[in-house]
Image (cartoon, rainbow, N blue to C red):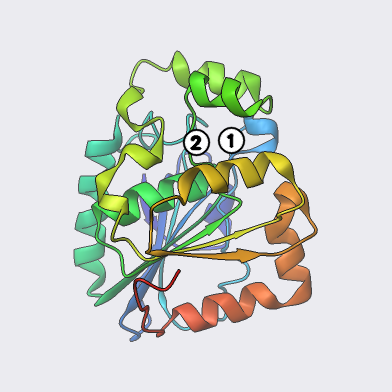
Amino acid sequence: MIKEFSRELLRDPECGILFDYQSDHDTLFICFAGGGPDMATSPPFEFSGVLRNLDVKKMFVRDISNCVYHNGLKHLSGNFEETTGILAAEVKRSGCKRVVTIGNCQGAYAAIYYGAMLQADLVLAFAPLTFVDEENRTRYGEKRWPDGFERLYNCGTAAPHLYDLTTLPETQDLPIDIYYDPHYVPDTNLVQHFIPGKTNIRVYERPGGEHLLVRNLKKSGELDEILEKACSSERALNIR
């Protein structure tokens, strides 16, 4: 379901999208949730707390089924194409002029994909999941979340042609800022796999935190700075 944001609805297991378009700011932040604990339980809406006092339009999105958004949004859509249509309609309804997509882990995967489909002005990707296919998982020794990947492969609506985001041509001109812990090999593999040949990506190495990088950025206050800057910053391309 799509409902107007309230703190109480953050715990509603039926909500796939919460929106808050009351701000007069012309920027809309679309925040995609990562996986639940070990990608095994329904994920919470992410970034709602840190954005509480930021004066922008906001949309919070989550894949309750924990299928890396391949299974659509509960009671709303059944696949990527249908979800894109819903998000595009919400972007129009918000009245925004700029779109920033944000995500962590599988939420970053969604932020990149839907950012490309919605022609976002900026993507903020934290410890991003950039591939989910078995070939690359074997190649890089990716052993995390085996049950979650098995659930994805068996969900019935998976789109194998989107298992590797490097194959998505729309990402070539998409302004993307990536934050990750360079000392954490699994996430480094995901980032280094994605960036070759792309001049539209800025990479920010933030040692410490491993896959829980966002938690460290919250504690240090840097996450607030990143989000505030994204409200109005002009993003130059071809800067890598």
Image spot of residue 18 (x, y percent):
42, 56
Residue type, numbered disc 1: Ser
Give yes or no for contact between labels 1 and 2 (Cβ–Cβ under 8 Å).
yes
Q: CA distance from mark 1 to mark 2?
A: 5 Å
Q: Nearer the viewer, residue 107 or 135?
A: 135
Pointer 1: what residue?
A: 42
Query: Is residue 138 shown above or below 132?
Result: above
Q: Residue furthest front?
A: 197
Quarter of the picture containing the N terminus is top left
Pointer 2: what residue?
A: 64
Q: Nearer the viewer, residue 84 or 168?
A: 168
Residue type, numbered disc 2: Ile
Q: If you read the primary sequence from the N terminus, does the residue marked by circle 1 or circle 2 appear first?
A: 1
Label 2, residues with CA under 10 Å away: few <14, some 14-19, many ≥20: many
Q: Do we see residue 34 in this rendering?
A: no
In terms of secondary structure, where does tag 1 sit?
Answer: loop
